[in-house]
Amino acid sequence: MIKTRNKRATVRDVAQLARVGASSVSRFLRGVPVRPKVAERVARAVKELGYEPDESARALRSGRSRTIGVILPKVSNLFFSQAVQLIEEEARQRGCTMLLLTHEDRLGEQLAHLAKLRRYRADGVILTGTHGTTVRGIRTAFPDVPVVAFDHYISSSLDSVLLCNREAARRATEHLLGHGYANVACVTGKPEIYSFEERTAGYSEAMSAQGRSPWLIAAANYEQLRFVLRDAIESENPPAALLSLSDFATRSVLTLYRELGRKAADCLPLLGFDDPDFAALVDPPLTVIRQPIAEMVRNAMSLLFSRIDGAAPKKARTVSLPGELVIRRSCGCC
Amino acid sequence: MIKTRNKRATVRDVAQLARVGASSVSRFLRGVPVRPKVAERVARAVKELGYEPDESARALRSGRSRTIGVILPKVSNLFFSQAVQLIEEEARQRGCTMLLLTHEDRLGEQLAHLAKLRRYRADGVILTGTHGTTVRGIRTAFPDVPVVAFDHYISSSLDSVLLCNREAARRATEHLLGHGYANVACVTGKPEIYSFEERTAGYSEAMSAQGRSPWLIAAANYEQLRFVLRDAIESENPPAALLSLSDFATRSVLTLYRELGRKAADCLPLLGFDDPDFAALVDPPLTVIRQPIAEMVRNAMSLLFSRIDGAAPKKARTVSLPGELVIRRSCGCC
DNA sequence: CTGTTAGCGCGTTCAA
DNA sequence: TTGAACGCGCTAACAG
């Protein structure tokens, strides 16, 4: 089969073949009512020519790109990769396509991404920012584009969807405390990240409420975290149990145990945020706080699109969703 | 602060302010040499106006959208989510943005995605197709757009990047056989997927070479797989070891063990494809075939861009990369 | 190297 | 309702 390098069909070609005006074609394609006869002829011409509208031209003309931008720290963990998948599906249902960008917690990259989305005229943005993100920076890039903060609170002037981080951490801590482990330590990497700050706060509240002083085991990255952690658990007075603030931190803990050659019985009771693949598979199975990813995405998308469609109140809204405590065995239950 | 709803600055505004022609602005922005004086004035005007070029207009005029499409079955496993992250980084370095679409192994969705990318005039496409994908279907959507098949061989007329699936499966099987487990079974979901077919073939070759008959434990999905698997390992003459063809299949195996309450000692020796989070964390740690994701992505992107830049030979190229056998303990080593 | 001109494909006027 | 004409913002082609 010889590849006929025909130029792509345009509305004009379709109009000509269907013997109607170009604007009738345009109307038909966008669902604006036209005479049945016209509709039929246009439909046939479209099919015959294999016509597909050009989204660039559409965007240029209409000012809407039918595109939403998604900016995340990374996609290579279960929380974000599931979120991406759900966002994509929902965007598709709403006739949009997703531009995906990751910043790996570098503010500079994130700013560059915002500028890029501006150039692409994204109709809206889902943003999980990093430490240092300001609403001012966002609004410089997007004076008039809807932005929803996802898993990250930036300002009351921005729509946000969040886990009830404090409450979840408090509940998790209380659960551990309830087992009689008085000296619960809190483990996290990148303690400056918003969610981790909040969770730390919730943890501290729960500890203080029982007259216990918080013990934060933190490090700038997860490599280092293992070392700090090792010092802590091999010290004279080690923690009685561990609250881990993310799947990454949990992985550090488990990796350390493995390096140390500890058997399941020698492991500190553990409760972690996120419900990664390995949670149910390790020994003992991990008790976790599971984030309601699907609901978070659903809420974020409906906030976003209500703004894109101009149907939102001016005031920004914040949706806080509770975490689910999934009890397995690592916490000491059973 | 009152939001001044100024229209966005355009090249003409910049040109006017800088007192140069519009095309000089365009040239400067694209890196085409201009007189230093002009460059400086344009740069200042751009800054002053906060000018950002409009990618829609650019795409419309130049025929290049600076966008690449990525179509995958899903992103919620480690292999694909890492691939996505790497693709995005590399696309960014090359000045492109990624449009991400997932089809969850539904051919219809995949076709719709191809059509969508056509409307967006994607400059190139990275595609992990599903069963039933034909080069004809792809070329109907993209007569003249570069497409690279990723982790999926479709036709010799399409650039492809692949794991050496057969060889890896053969080696893995031989490794298990080498431990003296004669009766090695092969476990997979969705056996019709290209990679799994190839791996199955490699497994069968290795078995046959030793005069053993292959035993395929397969199911259409991973829920069902657990049941089939259970029948197999609880039968009178169970397999002596298991070769799992993907992280999902491996997860099914481990989940089943957990459901059955089996201790590490009672688990069949196991070797699995992919190196997911949990591989090093479970007991015993999993021996796996790790796919060289970064290299696969690097190759795919350079194949793609050499075609986008018109610097590729006409003939399609296939890159096959070897898997890495990561020996831990589940296979019976140590 | 520069500026002017034209038109990419579409949606949105307008007058019919 | 329809079709013709215009222009969104930009870059390719040209003449200077």
Image: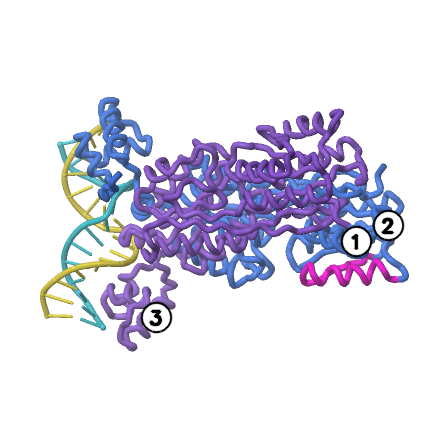
Chain colours: A purple, B blue, C yellow, D cyan
The answer to which quarter of the image holds residue B217 is: bottom right
Against A198, is B237 above or below?
A: below
Q: Nearer the viewer, residue D10 or B320?
A: D10
Marks 1 and 2 sit apart, C-alpha to C-alpha, by 9 Å
Graded by Cα atoms within 10 Å as few (under 14), some (14 to 19) or many (20 or more), the crowding at tag 2 reads few
Same chain check for tags 1 and 3: no
Residue drawn at point x = 84 percent, y = 42 percent: B332
Residue drawn at point x = 65 percent, y = 44 percent: A174
Q: Residue furthest top?
A: B36
Disc count in the image? 3
Please state which amino acid type lies under the numbered disc 2: Asp
Say which residue label 1 marks. Answer: B257
Counting residues from the N terminus, which is met first, the one under dot 1 or under dot 2?
1
User: Residue A59 location, x and y as percent?
Assistant: 31, 52
Query: What span is colored magenta in the figure?
Result: B214-235
Subunit ID for the residue under disc 3:
A
Q: Are marks 1 and 3 in contact (CB under 8 Å)?
A: no
Please state which amino acid type lies under the numbered disc 3: Ala
Q: Nearer the viewer, residue D2 or B267?
A: B267
Please state which amino acid type lies under the numbered disc 1: Tyr
Q: Is residue B209 visible?
A: no
User: Residue D12 location, x and y as percent?
Assistant: 28, 41
**Left or right: where does residue A141 sit relative to residue A174?**
left
**Left or right: where does residue B217 sit relative to residue B61?**
right
**Left or right: where does residue A1 sit relative to residue B259?**
left
Q: Nearer the viewer, residue A246 or A259?
A: A246
Say which residue label 3 marks. Answer: A43
Say which residue label 2 marks. Answer: B266
Q: Are marks 1 and 2 in contact (CB under 8 Å)?
A: yes
